Image: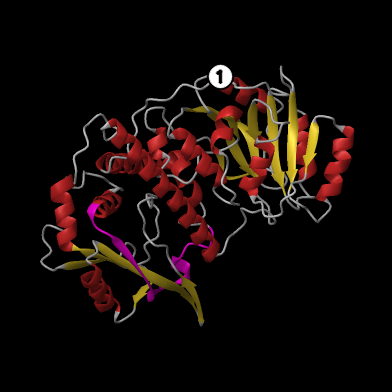
Amino acid sequence: ILERVDTRYLLFIPDAAGVHPDPRAPDRLIHTAEAVGAGAVFADYAEIGGETLRERPVNDYQTGSLRDGFDFGPLILLSTAAARRAMRKYGKIPAYRWAGWYDLRLKISTDRDLFRLPERLATVDRESVAPEGQGAGAGGHFAYVDPGNRPLQEEMEAAATAHLKRIGAFLAPEFRDLPPPAASFPVEASVVIPVRNRDRTIGDAVASALSQRTDFPFNVLVVDNHSADGTTERLAALAGRHPALKHLVPNRRDLSIGGCWNEAVFSELCGRYAVQLDSDDLYRGDDALQRLVDRLREGDCAMAVGAYTLVDAQLRQIPPGLIDHREWSDANGRNNALRINGLGAPRAFDTVILRRIGFPNVGYGEDYAVALRLSREYRIGRIYDSLYYCRRWEGNTDASLSIEQTNRHDHYKDRLRTLEILARRKMNEKRGERGDGAPIVPR
């Protein structure tokens, strides 16, 4: 199409079903493209059903907007010249079945802006729009770990990897050695549970942690972020009966989940390894902690991640079931991590390394931020068996989100990717390489 089109711009509508462009949308997009010299322009839209109109704003595009599911809205104006120039400079689109648009927009974005116009320029029939908080449909959040999507995901990974090499942010599979422990620890491992107002589930989570059978001493650090629903009293009672349970209440009142993790990790009570358990969730068996620590004890990784099973409040499996992240590879996992939205659970960390970087004090994406930062230098180990039940119920933080909340979350993760890309590029520049062994050539 791009070779044959004879216009300066091409209006791309990824899915025309139920899309109703504003009559002035093409002119507005073209005028914007002319004004800013963008490689592409996209805009907000609205969902319409009957007489109800619901705004669907989209996010600004940034360096770290590598998610192949990035929402551009229903209308994307492409500069024909920018697209052709990108293909001449970086190669034509490979014979992809699914990743053609993804490959093209990454190539265009290498040298030109993909510019968001924060105006509603189209409406879309409600039945054509993914429900709020679900991205591209009910399975969209987990599309990249669905075995049925593996061929599609391999194409997306190939396009993303080529882009990272192109911009100097690709990392070859060369990892730093772990430093020896600088100090002694009170126990070998600590299960870390941040909690706020989870009286309904915290007892089960604590029981799951305390039931672990190990060949080492461990404790359970519950960071109670000033709960007001009975959680605090329940934890105090449990701590009185179980010496291994440490009930920590921070002095600060401005902490999010990441800040609560810091309270535990930097505590003198923390063990050599810090292992995650959310206050809504459970370990699947009594050997989960042992297996995660055994993986870290092998000494080649700063973080180990298991697999989990998605269940409802009664522990009945719900789609998509097992999330094992078998898309991960030692050779390219930390590069592909910049394309996907998470690395899985449960997560276990080398406390010495974790104390060097800490968690960002945020309530969403704090685990992804730490995983990206660690993977920049260190290997991440994997266990592909399900060790963990991730519970979904109407009260937890993963329940359906508004479009505004979803956008904030997506923007934050894109920002984390932007930060990480810039850091990896800088690291490669210090070595004088793009990351794949080729010298860096100034643009």
Residue 387, given in percent of the width and then of the height, sits at 63, 31
Question: Which residue lies at the image location 37% right of the left edge and 32% below the top edge?
Answer: 332
Q: Amino acid at mark 1?
A: Pro
Q: Residue at left 52%, top 35%?
A: 324
Residue to which mark 1 is pinned? 180
Image check: 306 left or right of 100?
right
Q: Nearer the viewer, residue 206 or 414?
A: 414
Please tell me which residue is depicted at 17% across the width and 62% down the height of the picture. 80
Question: Dot 1 surroundings within 10 Å: few (below 14), some, or many (20 or more)?
Answer: few
Residue 83, position as x, y percentages in the image = 19, 57
* Residue 326 visible, this angle: no
Residue 198 visible to an observer of this rendering: yes
Residue 339 % position (x, y): 40, 45
- Nearer-the-camera pick, 303 or 7: 303
Q: Which residues are drawn in magenta?
A: 111-133
Position of 326 with respect to 364 (left or right) is left
Would you say residue 112 sits in the magenta stretch? yes
- Residue 81 placement, left or right of 273: left
- The image quadrant of residue 120 is bottom left
Q: Is residue 241 left or right of residue 3?
A: right
Q: Is residue 376 magenta?
A: no
Q: Position of residue 10 (x, y in %)?
A: 20, 66
Report helix, strand or loop for mark 1: loop
